[in-house]
Structure formats: structure tokens, C-alpha cells
Image (cartoon, grey):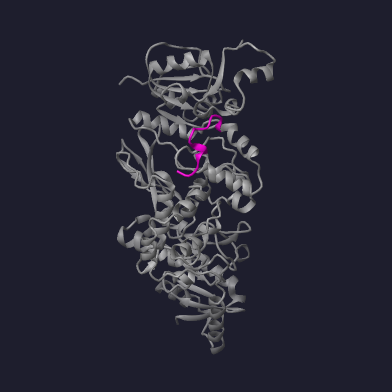
Amino acid sequence: MTKPRLGIFSLTGCAGDQLQILNMEDELLNLVARFHIVDFQEGSSHKESGPIDIAFVEGSVSTETDLRHLKEIRERSSVLIAFGNCATDGCVQAMRNGETTLAQRLKDVYGVEPDYYDALESKPIREYVKVDFSIPGCPVEKDEVVKAITSLLHGDSPLGYSYPVCVECKLHEYPCVIVEDNKPCLGPVVRAGCEARCPGLGLDCIGCRGPVEDGSNFAAELQMLLDKGYTEEFIMNRLRIFSGELPEDFLGGAK
Amino acid sequence: MLINILEKENLVEFFEAMQSYGEVVAPVRATDNAHRFQPVKGIDELDLDYTRTMIPPKKYFIQPKETLFTFNKEKEKYLEPPSIDKSMVLLGVHACDINAMNLLARVFMEELPDKYYLERRKNSVIVGVSCTPDEKCFCKSTGTDYAQEGFELFLHDIGDKYLVRVGSLKGHNIVKDHSELFAAPEKGDLDAFKEAEKTRLSSFTIEIEMSGLQDHLDMSYDDPLWAEYAEKCLGCGSCNLVCPRCRCYDVQDYINLDMNTGERVRMWYSCMLKDHGLVAGGHNFRPTSMERLRNRINCKGSLREEMPNCVGCGRCTVFCPADIDFVEILQKVRGDIK
């Protein structure tokens, strides 16, 4: 049997998600043995052209170059996976989207008028191409990556986390930092999959895996935290650090 | 004897005797609001005078998340985890939780026998303990404030002694094998028990009228109250996951990168989560949070073995991050409050 052709690509981001793959030391040999790797910048300078069975794309679209690169990857790939929060949600570089224009931000930060940088407003990749599956996280969780890969090798579509961090807090019997300590925890509206690592240490969730898009109620979360005395600015800033470009209907309320 | 007396000064010896039946798990203070059942090595670690744990003791029979078995395709073998036949003593379980487990026992031991649940219950000793209700307890309303079965021994605090009821043959043998720890009750002990029960029963501050509740729920199907609460509900699933009587779970198979070995995992699940009602073909029976919330309250308020699917422990209210009050919803359903 020929091995599936795998490409691992970076757009604008810190490349921490590619690094997570290299960090999968116990699985790495098994992983490279299963695939024909056509592109993996952080692992090797070897690159091949031609079709790709599975493409992992990390980073957000923040330049025209990113956009051309992404469209080319999409054309070459059967399955395209948004890999890490920059790709799935835009992450930190998208947290000011909608507040001021890109031109204004360039001026405020760099003091320049013209667009020297071929910059675009940072967006998650779903804004430009069809995404077959998302693996969120800043960075991604190794265990989730392995599970997604084995599902694909097995011919199944991977299972994501459709439920919030609260579920994992309860499964681990971690005391609720909202109920016990009135902390501004984003756990009720943020994707699980981290095994509630932060609440397990008594820390409130800051949302590094992005929003549960379907089925959570951000309007209620916002109201709950406002009632506890936190400001809307604080809550929105916290949410948008990792959730950058929020899905349109996310802020809308109960669904 | 079905009624015995255990002097509190014999509690250390009693605890040591219980250790001979397996690892003792008991309530230990975890936070301001909650205790936690966990393994204890000595009587000084546990706190029998507690109100509630966040996660109910059912976690020892159907675990929050567990590997049911691992498999090896090539060798056509599967292997169950070794923990399934571990002996255990659950010390200090409240009546509401025992009654909740009595329902789970019907589901997991009789209707659809689950070998994990069966083995673990068979290998365990349950020792109940009496309690004093707080302002969120309403087990008297649900008829689950007193345990008639589903335990080996039940300790009722009557001052400097426990009145110990025997609830099973295993419990009878425990008393017989450690007869030096127990005494026959005297008239004063029985009087003290009756007084303690009176005090307990008069301590409840909230109640729900259960009479005809199912019909009231049916009649409230289109009531705007469901949408009102759904607006406040985070949809986080906490209410189900702390419920001693919820029994929904999800099962997933994971294969390792060798594409040969793997495991089957079961975890508790919640009907408040969106994909609980999702079926093959993409249809969702309860696509909105309003429908999910209404469904949960209807499930809790419906009868099962002549008892509601709720034991009145108050956990879903206490541990709701959005402060949704279960009793308040049912009082609105009945029209007791607006």
C-alpha cells in the first residue's frame, strides 16, 4: 500500500504547533513510518510538489503571501486540517479585528501610511478556504493530534471536542473556580480537550482552545461575569486573546 | 441483630475493621462548598459530618472516564483493566446517594447488566451515614432522605454513639465478625434515634410538591419559562455531571499509531451538551438549549420505579456556574411561584 502523502504547513504564527509534532517523541517514528512527508518546514528542508492526501495548516492568513500559499495548499490537498488556534480562530493577531482598520493599526504601531508589508487583517483559514477538520489549541494537544491522525489513517473522520472545559473539570473532580472562587473562568464556553489543565491547578480558563462554536451560550457567560463585577472590556479582551476572530453567531446568545 | 449500637469511641477500631474489606474511600473536605470521596488511610482524614460531595459516589461503580478494554487486532485479543475487581469500602454515603445508586443498580445490574458495575458493586461495602440537610437539600420531597436498602451498614448519629442499621447479609456478617465493637440498643438509644430523626426531618427549608408533577411538566411544555432559563444556561453540562442519578455515557474507540492496538473508552456524558441528541444522518432531537433544558427537567421530574429521577441532593443547583436553581424551576412549573 502506498503511504498517504502528508504536508505540514505554516502561515503566520509562532510555529508552535509544528513544534508539538516534533515534541511527540514517543510517536514520531511511528508517525513518519506511516506517511510520505512532502513538506514539514520545521522538521526538514526537503520539499516536494504534487498532490497531498492530508495537509495540516498552522498559522493565520495575515499577508497576501499567506493567502496565495493557503490557496495553493488547498488545491493540492484532499483533506485540509486547520491546525492550532491561529488557523482555527485567528488567535492573538486577530484580537483587534473589527476595532480599528488595518491601515489605522499599521499607522499606530509602525507610523507608516502605505502598505509595505503586503499585510491583510489576520483571519482564521476558514475565512478563505474549505476546512475539513479543526484541531484547536495554543498549542495543539499532542494526544488530540495522534487521535486525529489515527482516525484518518483508519478511514474515519476525526472526532473533535464539541463540549466545554467544564465537562473535563467535572470528570476530574476539579473544584469549579467560578462557583468556589468567583474567578472569570471561560471554561463554560471554551473547547475541552486540555483535560482542564488550568482549573486543575486552581486557575481560571483563559480560553486557549477557542470557543465552543455550537451549543455554548456566550451571552450568558458574559452576563454571569458582569454580575460578578468583571467589565465587558476585560472579558472580551480575555476571550479574544486566543479566539481572535469570533464566529458571527457566537456572541448572539442562547441557541 | 438488625439494629446495633457503635460507640463513637470505637470508631477507630471500626475503621480498621472496615479496612479488612478493601480500600476505604470516604468524604474528605475539598472546598468551602464540597467534600470529595477519596481513599483514606486513617479515621482522622475523613469527615463524616459533611453536607455533600461535588461528584457523587457512583463514580466508583461507573467511573467518570475509564478504559473498558484494550485490544490487539493481530492477536485477536482484548484485555480488561485490572481495577475492575478491586475491593472497596464506601464509608459515609448519604441516603440520597444510596437511593440514587439503587436506581443505577437496577439499570446497570438488572435491566442491562454491565459487568464493570456488577463486579465493582459485588466487591464493595457501602456504609451509609446520617446527615443534616442544608438550605439546598430537598430529599424529603423526593422521598429519598432515608435509605431502606442498597447498603451494608447505615450509621445514624445519635450523640456519642451511632445507631447502626444492617442492610444486607454482608452487613450482617460484618457485625457478626466484629461483635466486640457493637452492642444491643437500649431504650435510650432508640429514643435518641427517634429524636435525631425528628430534628433531621424538621431541618428542611425547601420543598417541591411531587404530587402530579409529571402532569404539571406535560402541561408546561410550551411555557415561556424554558426559554427564560435557557437564556441564562451556559450549556456546560455541569448539572448532569454532578448528578448522582444521571447515567448517560459516551463510548469511543481509539486506535494507536501502530494501527493494531487500541482501547475502548467510556465517559459520563450530559444531555445538556448539543450532540447528546445527535443521531446518524445528522438529525438532532434537541438542537436548541431550550429543548435540552426542558428535556433535563422533564427527565428529572419523571417517575422511575415510583420515584422521581432526582434524589434531592441539591448538587445541580449548588454547582451551576450560572446559578440556575432546580427547585425554583419546578416551583414555577407548578405555579407555586411566578
Q: In the figure, is residue B7 to the left or right of B104?
A: right
* Residue visible at 46% across and 12% down in the picture: A47
Q: Is residue B277 above or below residue B177?
A: above
Image quadrant occupied by the N terminus of chain B:
bottom left
- Front residue of this view, candidates B168 and B296: B296
Q: Nearer the viewer, residue A85 or B52?
A: A85
Give residue A199's position: percent from left, percent from top.
59, 45
Residue A38 seen by the camera: no
Residue in the picture at 46% in, 77% down: B176
- Residue B326 is situated, as x and y percent measured from the top left of the image, at 49, 60
Query: Is B333 colored magenta in this rendering?
Result: no
The quarter of the picture where residue B108 lies is bottom left
Instruction: Residue B27: name its quadrant.
Output: bottom right
Examine the rendering and report whether any part of residue B43 can be seen: yes
Where's residue B75, x and y in %? Answer: 31, 38
Can you say whether B196 is above or below A235 in the image? Answer: below
Instruction: Characterize the magenta stretch by its predominant secondary structure.
Output: loop
Counting the numbered discs, the total is 0
Q: Position of residue A190 (x, y in %)?
A: 52, 40
| Between B202 and B83, the one nearer to me in the picture | B202
- Is residue A99 shown above or below B110? above
- What is the magenta range? A243-255
Q: Residue at x 53, y 72 (%)?
A: B130
> Horizontal placement of B29 versus A216: left or right?
right
Q: Is residue A251 magenta?
A: yes
- Image check: A206 left or right of B229? right
Quarter of the rendering containing residue A156? top left
Q: Judge by depth and name the residue closer to the eye, A44 or B290.
A: B290
